């Protein structure tokens, strides 16, 4: 059982279909949050001078809230394209180890598995975990689909309805609240709580002095401490 869904371990397409639908159902609340966050991104992007089409294409191809907001923050503060792309790459580099973990659960050649891995986002990756090191492939696709469509649609709304005030509506708080919800679901014992607090401390200490993106990577490294704990 993964996030309320059935693990697709059988050889029937019906079971795989159920797993996909369960992922779609469980991903719906995350999709609602993604829509609101994407509206915020669209508004902020146009306010920063990004063309509407570029913002929409970015959401469709990058599909990473953290990476997109990081790049937008650098560009909005006067940074060049290289700095914006570099920052987004640093922030999104967490997907590399996530992809290594997910790879054996995908299918086909390396190219096909690489393409399938593009559907991965934080929530779908975490929710599709079976608990034994493997991932429910169909569940992950359904969960990601429930977020991808609202993400792109929300960006479209945001860029074409620029009268929205993100701060007045509280949209600027959606992004951190989203990751806090993921964290709350993972903190189930003292060890994980300690790792989470240590990571937060490292990030807060580095924010004033480190380039954007680096505090996140340094804080993520603290999570390796959890590997020393009992399984």
Image (tube, rainbow, N blue to C red):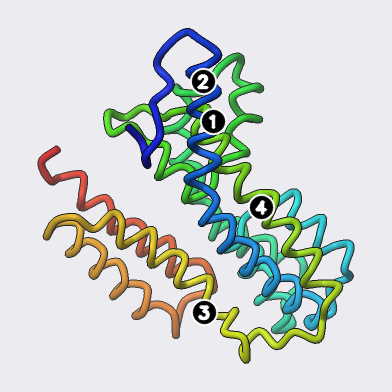
SS at circle 4: loop
Report whether 194 appears left or right of 112. Answer: left
Q: Are marks 2 and 1 in contact (CB under 8 Å)?
A: yes
Q: Nearer the viewer, mark 3 or mark 2?
A: 2
Residue drawn where x is 81% and y is 60% of the image: 56
Which residue matches tag 3? 173
Q: CA distance from mark 3 to mark 4?
A: 19 Å
Q: Who comes first in sequence, dot 4 or dot 1?
A: 1
Label 2: few (<14), some or many (≥20) within 10 Å? many
Above or below for 86 versus 137 = below
* 197 or 41: nearer the viewer: 41
Image quadrant assignment for residue 82: bottom right
Residue hosting label 4: 63
The kind of secondary structure element at disc 2 is: helix
For the image, the number of numbered tags is 4
Spatial CA span between label 4 and label 1 = 20 Å
Quick check: 72 left or right of 109?
right
Badge 4 crowding class, 10 Å Cα cut-off, few under 14, some 14 to 19, many 20 or more, is many
Quick check: 58 left or right of 3? Answer: right
Residue 31 horizontal/vertical position (percent):
58, 55
For label 1, the residue is 20
Q: Nearer the viewer, residue 156 or 62?
A: 156
**Sequence-earlier tag: 1 or 3:** 1
Expressed as whole percent of the image width and height from the top left, the position of residue 200 reads 31, 72
Using the numbered discs, state the Cα–Cα distance from disc 3 to disc 2 in whole angstroms. Answer: 36 Å
The quarter of the image holding the N terminus is top left
Q: In the structure shown, which secondary structural element does the residue marked by tag 3 occupy?
A: helix
Secondary element at tag 1: helix
Eyeballing the image, is 153 above or below 168? above
How far apart are the alpha carbons under marks 4 and 2?
A: 25 Å
| Rendering quarter of residue 102 | top left
């Amino acid at each position: 059982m993964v996030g309320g869904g059935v693990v697709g371990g059988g050889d029937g397409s019906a079971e795989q279909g159920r797993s996909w639908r369960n992922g779609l159902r469980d991903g719906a609340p995350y999709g609602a949050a993604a829509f609101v966050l994407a509206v915020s991104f669209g508004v902020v992007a146009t306010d920063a001078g990004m063309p509407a089409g570029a913002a929409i294409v970015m959401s469709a191809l990058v599909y990473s809230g953290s990476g997109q907001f990081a790049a937008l923050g650098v560009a909005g503060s006067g940074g060049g394209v290289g700095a914006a792309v570099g920052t987004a790459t640093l922030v999104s580099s967490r997907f590399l180890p996530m992809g290594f973990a997910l790879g054996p659960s995908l299918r086909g050649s390396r190219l096909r598995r690489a393409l399938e891995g593009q559907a991965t986002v934080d929530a779908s990756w975490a929710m599709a975990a079976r608990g034994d090191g493997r991932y429910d492939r169909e569940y992950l696709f359904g969960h990601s689909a429930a977020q991808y469509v609202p993400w792109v649609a929300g960006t479209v709304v945001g860029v074409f309805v620029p009268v929205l005030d993100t701060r007045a509506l509280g949209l600027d708080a959606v992004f951190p609240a989203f990751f806090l919800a993921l964290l709350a679901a993972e903190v189930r014992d003292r060890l994980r709580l300690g790792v989470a607090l240590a990571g937060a401390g490292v990030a807060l200490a580095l924010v004033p002095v480190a380039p954007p993106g680096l505090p996140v990577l340094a804080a993520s490294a603290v999570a390796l401490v959890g590997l020393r704990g009992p399984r």
